[in-house]
Structure formats: C-alpha cells, structure tokens
Image: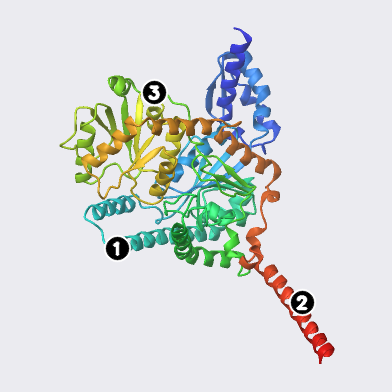
Amino acid sequence: MNVSNIWREIRSDLSTLRGFRGLRSYKLTARCLFKPFFWQQSFNGFRTVGGMNLKMRHPSNAIFALLLVPLACVFGGKILVVPLDGSHWVNMKVLIEELHLKGHDITVVRASNSWYTKEMSPFYTSVSVPHTGGFDEEFFGNLIMRLLHAQRQGMSFWSQMRMERESHTHFSLLHKSMAEMTAQILEDKKLMQSFHDADYDLVLTDPGVGVGTILARRLEVPLVYNVRWTVQGEAHFVIAPSPLSYIPFTATELTDKMSFGQRVKNFVAYVVGMYVMSQITEVHYKPVIEHYFGPDVNYDTFFQDADIYLMRNDFIFEFPRPTMPNVVYMGGFQCKPANPLPKDLEEFVQSSGEHGVIMMSLGTLVGELPVDITEEIAAAFAQLPQKVIWRHTGQRPATLGNNTLLVNWLPQKDLLAHPKTRVFVAHGGTNGVQEAIYHGVPIVGLPLAFDQRDNLSRMRAKGAATMVDTGTLDRDIFADALKAVLHDPTYRETMQKLSRLHRDQPMKALDRAVFWIEYVIRNKGAPHLRTHSNKLSWFAYHSIDVFATLLTVVLVVTFTCISILRCLWGKLFA
C-alpha cells in the first residue's frame, strides 16, 4: 500500500477516534490516551474503547493514529450550547456538527419538550430541562393559515391589527416561558454546580431568546452569538450605528435609497418596532436579571456584551451599512456542495429536457397552503413546459398537471445545485434565500409571515427575485411571475453574479465561524473587540452634552463680548 493511501486511512481512523466523546476535551490527562484497553486487539485490526469497537484497517494505522491522537485532542474545547428551537436549530446544528468534527466537546441545553433539538445525538451531550412552554409548532402553523385565509378574504386594517396583536401576545408568552425556564435553571443548584464543575470554555447561543446570555453571565464564561435577531431586535440595530436615513428598518421593504416620505416611514417604523419589541421581551427578562444580578445591572446593555456576533447574513444579502469589530459575517455558512439526487428524482429531473425544473418549498412550518391557493398554484404550474418538484403534504390539487411531482420531502440543496433547476419558489426564509444565493438560482417569492417579505424585498431590490402577494394570487398572476423569471435572463444572471461574489472570499463562511469560536476559546474571550458605545447614554453617544456645552460657551462668550462692547460704546459716546 502506498504512503498516500496509508495517510488517508489514518486520517479516517483519527476522525473515528475524534468522534468518541471521551477523547474530545483538551482537559483530559495524557494517561487516558494510553490505558491498556486502548491497545487491546490493536494488532489484529481492532481496538476497544470504552466498550465501543473501532475497526482499524491495518495494524500500523493503529500505532500511527494512536500517536497522533494527542495532537487531535489538544485544541478541543468544552462548549455549552443554548439554541433556539424551530428553524433556528437548523443553523445551530450545522455549527455543532462542525465543532464536533474539530474535536470540541459539545453540551446542548434543551427544553424537555423541544420541537427540533433531539435529546440523543452523536454530536453532543444534551441537558434536558423539564419544561412545558416554548415553541408551539401547531400554533405558528395555524397562525400562518389564518393569516392567509384573512388575506384572501380582504383583511381590513383593524383585522390586521388584531392578528398582529395576537402574534405579539404569543411571542410574549414564548419569552415569558423562556424567562421562567432560565429562572428554573438558575435555581437548580445541582444543575448549576454541574455547569460550574464542567468548566466550559465558552457559551454559544442564539440570542433570539435570553436563556443562553443569562446563563453565560452567571457562569462567567465568554459568550458567542449565532445571530440575526436578538431579544432587543435585529442585531445591527442593537449594537452598530444605524442611521435611519439610509438603513431600512425591518419589515419596511425599503432599500438604502429612500425618498423623504420613505425616511419618515422608516423612522416611524423604527420607533414603533423597537417599542413593541421591548414590550414583548423586556417585561419578562428584566425581573430575572434584576433578581439574579442585582438592580444596578443595565438591562439595555446586558444582552449586548457578547464577545463575537456570528451574523447569519452578509453584504451580498444586506445593504451596505456600518458594523462593529466583533461582528463576523457568515452568510450562507449552512450551504454545502450537493450530493447526487436519488435515482427516481434524477430521472424526473432529466426528463425535463431543455426546459428544466422548478422547485417549490415553503420551509419547515408550512407543508401545505389553503386549498384555493393550492389549486391556483397547481393550475399555473400546469401551463408551463418545465417539470415541477413541489413539497406539498396536503390534499392533491384537482388542477395538478402531469408535469408536477408532489413530494413530502425534497433534498433542497441538492436540487438547487442541479444544472437543470431554473427557478426556486420559496417563502423567503433566511436559510432558503442563502441557499438560493449560494447555488445561483433566482427566486419567485411567496412570503407568508415574519421576516420573509423583508428578505425577499432585498433580493427583489438586487434584481434576483420577484414576489407574489398570496392575498391576490391566482393562476395567471403566478404564471406571469414564473414566466418573467424563466424568460428574463437578467434574474438568473444577477443571482449567479451574487453567487460568485458570495463564493469569492479567502475562507468559507463556516470555517470563518469556527475560527472565531476557537479564537474566543484560545484567548478566553475577546473583550478588545467589544465597543464601549453601548455603555453610553443616548445623549452622550450622540455628543449632545458636548454640543450643549460648546453652544453654552459660545453663547456666554458672545453675550459677554456684546455686553463689553455696549459698555464701551456707552462710555465713549455718552
């Protein structure tokens, strides 16, 4: 066997070793690597480690791999992960799996009734907190369906306000539940002692809820955010200078080029939006912070002191704006090279010929739409020569054409990467938009709720997408939108340009994220990157006190000079 093949097998065996949980922490003593059971059966091609059989293809590999294990383990850290459930878990899981591959020891704190975060995993150890609140998949699914029905029937302003209030109320209950879970964790002395004894190097959390931030502060360990949204709003607006004259606020669908009227709209939306956000979250987390950290702790800055913000977007997606030294952009970090399609799906795709394929998926929450919308969409697809792959879990539409394949699940990234995929019909979630950018596939957007319309409006402004309002959607409107993106080459050219820009960087987004997590572990934090601006009052931040002082000095000097001149004038000409 040649040297390259031996080295390839050694690397594979090391990867297997690294997957063994007992060897991942750099805090292990060296003797654990050389206990006698490690050598059992090593020269007949097997090793037994803690009751787990690991096969080595060659005896020499076992020796080389064993000698190299300390090198693989020495850089591993102990990371406590506090995720946010739902689609946000999809992002966090990507980071967890990569950190596990790098040799880090991962512990995940999860609610016992967690929606997506599983208790058992080969990538992490879980700590399940008994809990009955949190995300309610059924509620959010029903909310979206009711919203769509209301839009189809012509929802009045007051009806829209009632639904908005209902949504805010449920989010408020979610944060109340998370605050209660936080207090439950902090009151559990045995659990907290286990966290202290574990001596974690870092807490990695999604600040969409406050549990991880509060726990990190209590344990006094460095903190890294996997973030776009925080409990105080969109992360940029929380920590970075955000002039409203050219930075559009969330959900306004504005760009960085605004007229006077649009700037008024942006300002009002900002004031109202930040107030509503504080009413949803602050009333629940602030009492917890005051109780466990004292009344002198500033709530406004408490959630802003993360060492690193791993931002789940970049300036391919965002409009240009000011940022901060501890913000690291990792837009599209979850995107990976494609795998081959299953045989039956590949055959269906190839049967499309030169016309290609349209893919439709509306994310994790929505497997089906109201029947009337579904029928119109199916009828529109039936008008096209393209083949269609549609993730749909509801009743089969009566208007479905022979060119459309309904599936309960589809390999989204693999289909997006396929050269025959022409259009992606999507709801506008961040994950789907980033994957479309990565693979260069233009979007026809059907925004349903939350930040989806805002995400799609950004892609529309860049010329890579078009949007269809579900309230007015019919077969002709939807077919026209599809034909526009299919037949106007500028949509595809623009998206492929964005894809090239996204890929043209010295380091992959996921590697960059892992580097900065390990950077914080190595340096026990990154306080030198945190700005002091969030400690300033609003009038000090904007130098209003300085301006007022200087203005006062100028006025006093001017008044004094005028008084002296008047006095001299009076004496000279009296």
Q: What x and y, as percent, mark residue 80?
A: 57, 46
Is 59 displayed left or right of 150 in the figure?
A: right
**Front-most of residues 305 and 213:** 305
Give me the C-alpha separation between circle 3 and circle 2.
74 Å
Q: Residue furthest front?
A: 573
Residue kind at label 1, given as amino acid type: Phe
Residue annotated with mark 2: 557
- Please tell me how crowded label 3 is: few (under 14), some (14-19), or many (20+) other residues with Cα within 10 Å: few
Task: Decide if residue 363 is in sight here.
Answer: no
- Furthest-left residue in this view: 398
Q: Categorize mark 1 by other alpha carbons within 10 Å: few (<14), some (14-19), many (20+).
A: few
In this view, the residue farthest toward the top is 1
Name the foreground residue: 70 vs 462. Answer: 462
Nearest to N terminus: mark 1 or mark 3: 1
Q: What is the three-letter code of the residue carrying label 2?
A: Val
The label on residue 157 is 1
Residue bearing the label numbered 3: 419
Q: Where is residue 573 in the image (x, y as percent from the top left)?
A: 82, 89
Q: Earlier in the sequence, mark 2 or mark 1?
A: 1
Mark 2 residue element: helix
Is residue 213 in sight in this rendering? yes
Give me the residue at 42% from left, 34% from top: 436
Q: How far apart are labels 2 and 1 at the CA level? A: 56 Å
Q: At x 60% / y 61%, what residue is drawn?
A: 301
